[in-house]
Image (cartoon, helix red, strand yellow):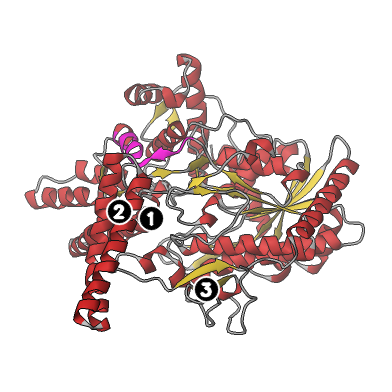
Amino acid sequence: MRARPPTTETTDDSPSRYIARISLSTGKEVPGLIDPDELLVHAHRDHHPVEVMAQFVASRLVHLTQSEDAVRVGLKKIHRLAGKLAERVGSVTGSEAMARQTKKLLGVVDRRVVFRFREPTHLSEKEVRARVEKLERDARTLLKARGRNPRLHVLVTGATGFLGKEILSQVAEDRRIEQVVAVVRPETIRDPKTKEAVKVLSPQERGALLLERLRIGGARAKKFRFVEGDIEKPSLGIAPGELARLRKTLTHVVHCAASVSFDDTYGNSYRANVLGCLNALNFSVACQEAEGSPFIHHVAIETSYIHGRKKASIAQEGALVFPRHFYNNFYELTKAFASIETDRAMIAKGLRVAQLLPSIVIGNSRTGNNRGDTKVVNAPINAFGRAKEASENAGDEPLDKARVWMIARMANSFPGDPTAELNLVPVDRVVAGILAALTVPEAISARIHLATDNRIRSDDIVRIVREELGVNVRLADPTLYRNVTLPIVKTALNAVGEPKLANALQKLGTIFGGYGEWGQPIHEIGNDVKILGLPIRRPNTEHAFRMLCRHNKYVQEFGRVRDADEVARRERVWEKALEEMERRTGHEVAAIPTARFRELLAEQVDFKTFRPRGRLRYARPRAERSQA
């Protein structure tokens, strides 16, 4: 059945705008506001010792039997049996209260409601299909009118972020794209010690620095313009005069600005991911409707995890159904809301729009370069490396050694089931898909997963970390880590004066506590090849993760090197060193064994200064040459 339209009991950012609570007994919507916490996994688990133990035992059985389906069926049978036992107790005693108490004792949960996404439209499937076909025809006509050399004008949000930087880097070499307008906010530079404002960089100054760090100069730099704006404001916060100019020239909008903090609040996630999406969509609608507009289509960057927890079932590219096992965090949830808003803009407002859904994005597939990013997968790698260095640099005092040993033991646990599979995708593959979508009208109305078919298991992650970092990382059951280990470790670390490490481990549990459990979703793929025309051979995930570890170790020194100019300089040296290694060995750098890789790198790079030992030729940027 279709859920009813939103009731009047909603707020501007309420989940009730997108989701209906349906009674299992009546099949009708239950009125009232939906608390965002109700939609997350943690609200429906770990509330009973029996449940915690059941999840732990289930993970062990999955590891032994290699059959998630069998274990899942077994858990359902046990749950039903426990429920019948409780009812039997109530029948024998003649007390419903006793039955409820028995259910509570056995950890039996009666779910009385389910959640469903609201339909983005009440049009029939045939009517929607007719509208979509018209949008595709219109886009094809507009694109064809630009000839074989389309000379695209593209606006990009999020250009200063991890994904945005890679977009600018690849766009610089893309002859189809004549001009890129990046929406950027001014940046306040603060004194690292006093935190007082030192100066404010204008969008144009930020853009010039960004191009310098990306080694985009000369004629290539002339295709970029940086304008002041803010995605959380109407019309993206762009000045009226600039708006009028853009509506006459833009052919595409690529919206990739987002909050990727998995532990952020609902309000912050909603503003960045939903309100920002709405403003970008409305901006594109205005461009498309402007008289004489050359606008072709909007490209929305979402995430393949809008499908939430699927328990090893297929997350279909084209479908969006509220997950039976809920969402891991507000990032996933608000990205799902953004996808719904994108559908509404397409159907109700006639916006030509494509949705691209990357999985967990990591550094470059060949080099591991991440342009200084320290979030998501980089965070645990840096934590492991720094804990190892601390243990190696411990003083001679017995108490000092004991303290460092304890910290290392605590920090080297990774919350992951051995069978859990993470879908990591290199940033260069994602951006190749984004740029391909610009000239593919067939991408309109599609949700396209930019993910991989060679997922990496938790035990492979631990093995590679041991090989590359020399850290004896141990897999910890996510359920016990979350409910038992982490609270104890945090208390102990705070007691020995390590609050930063305690906070880092809390974030590690937040990020990987859900993604490291057994039964991860399997993201359907194929449209990246069939529609966008990307190579069918996707990057080797194990190789990409190995290079991420090497990059974080040598280039970033486990997150210590944070200065953007220094990271950019080091990555240039790193790229040249890797090229020389491949030339000398005839092998991909990721395939070179760990010890041999270090030997080859040491021959070319001084580890203390991270400067080339010999003639590693690379073009130094103007700012670096002026300091020489």
Badge 3 crowding class, 10 Å Cα cut-off, few under 14, some 14 to 19, many 20 or more, is some
Mark 1 or mark 3, which is nearer to you? 3
Q: How many marks?
A: 3
Name the N-terminal-most of marks 3 and 2: 3
Residues under numbered marks 1 and 2 in contact, where contact means CB atoms less than 8 Å apart: yes
From the viewer's side, name the closer residue of 343 and 102: 102
Left/right placement of residue 292 relative to residue 60 reads: right
Instruction: Kindly identify which numbered label has been placed on residue 478.
Output: 2
Left/right placement of residue 441 relative to residue 391 reads: right
Q: Is residue 19 magenta?
A: no
Q: Where is residue 152 in the image (x, y as percent from the top left)?
A: 80, 44
Q: Is residue 458 magenta?
A: yes
Badge 1 crowding class, 10 Å Cα cut-off, few under 14, some 14 to 19, many 20 or more, is many
Q: Is the magenta stretch mostly helix, strand or loop?
A: helix
> Measured along the vertical axis of the image, is residue 6 above or below residue 126?
below
Q: Dividing the image into 4 quarters, which one contains the N terminus?
A: bottom right
The residue pinned by badge 1 equals: 514
Instruction: Name the residue rendered at 84%, 40% in the picture.
Output: 150
From the viewer's side, name the closer residue of 360 and 46: 46
Name the N-terminal-most of marks 1 and 2: 2
Q: Position of residue 174 (x, y in %)?
A: 72, 36
- State the extent of the magenta-drawn residues as a range: 454-466
From the viewer's side, name the closer residue of 447 and 260: 447
> Measured along the vertical axis of the image, is residue 231 above or below residue 438?
below
> What distance separates the C-alpha of mark 1 from that of mark 2?
7 Å
The residue pinned by badge 3 equals: 22
Q: Which amino acid does label 1 sit on?
A: Gly
Most extreme residue toward the left is 398
Q: Where is residue 207 in the image (x, y as percent from the top left)?
A: 65, 52
> Measured along the vertical axis of the image, is residue 292 above or below residue 148?
below
Instruction: Name the residue rendered at 87%, 41% in the picture.
Output: 144
Q: Which amino acid does label 3 sit on?
A: Ile
